[in-house]
């Protein structure tokens, strides 16, 4: 009589796993790993969205300090982030660049002059595309708004629209 794992030559090997059993276990592990990786990617995108929001709110705060010091938001030299005194102010520019880096997209800026002359800004709005949802933008403006929306101008007033 045999005492090892082989009972006799007519019976199959009774110790260990079959190839199909091992394949199923490996497939299960691969599925779990895939789910974890996808979840981590989603969490990273949401983290980037929070960093975008934080950067834009920091720019909003810095703009209020700029206004307190200058009594306006600077000279309007065009309709881009690179052509207005406010958006070129170093602390604001740094915050806008951070938001663009986290988003992977350009920041959109608009300034307004309610006097109708279009020279000195008394309102502004900034938005950037969110990382987790490319159809949504986070927007902040001179009125204190901070929400999902986009920068807009109605007449000579810049604001965040919903």
Image (spheres, helix red, strand yellow):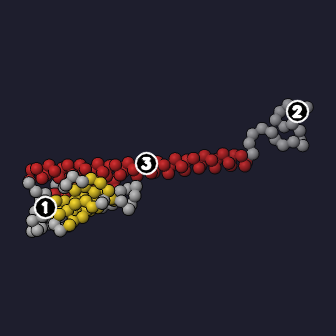
Say above or below: 10 vs 152: above
Q: Residue at x 81, y 41 (%)?
A: 13
The location of residue 83, given as percent across then percent down, is: 18, 64
The residue that label 3 is drawn on is 43
- The spot of residue 129 in percent (x, y) is 33, 59
- Residue beneath label 2, please? 2
Report if residue 88 is visible in the image: no
Question: 152 or 12, which is in the foreground?
Answer: 152
- The answer to whether 1 is drawn above or below residue 138 in the figure is above
Which residue is tagged 1? 121
Quadrant where the C terminus sits is bottom left
Please state the horizontal and vertical placement of residue 14, each as a whole percent of the image.
80, 39
Image quadrant of residue 138? bottom left
- SS at circle 1: loop
Q: Nearer the viewer, residue 94 or 62?
A: 62
Q: Nearer the viewer's eye, disc 1 or disc 3?
A: 1
Give the mark nearer the N terminus: 1 vs 3: 3
Q: Secondary structure at mark 3?
A: helix
Q: Residue at x 39, y 50 (%)?
A: 46
Count up the numbered dots. 3
Could you tell me which secondary element the residue under label 2 belongs to? loop
């Amino acid at each position: 009589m045999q005492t090892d794992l082989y009972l006799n030559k007519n019976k199959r090997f009774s110790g260990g796993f079959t190839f199909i059993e091992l394949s199923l276990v490996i497939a299960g592990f691969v599925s779990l790993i895939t789910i974890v990786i996808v979840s981590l990617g989603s969490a990273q995108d949401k983290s980037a969205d929070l960093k975008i929001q934080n950067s834009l709110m920091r720019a909003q705060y810095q703009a209020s300090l700029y206004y307190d010091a200058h009594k306006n938001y600077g000279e309007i030299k065009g309709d881009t982030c690179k052509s207005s005194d406010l958006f070129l102010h170093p602390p604001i520019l740094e915050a806008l660049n951070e938001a663009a880096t986290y988003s992977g997209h350009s920041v959109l800026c608009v300034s307004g002059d309610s006097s109708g002359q279009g020279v000195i800004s008394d309102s502004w709005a900034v938005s950037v595309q969110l990382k987790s949802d490319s159809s949504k933008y986070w927007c902040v403006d001179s009125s204190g708004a901070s929400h999902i929306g986009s920068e807009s101008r109605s007449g000579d007033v810049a604001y965040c629209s919903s």
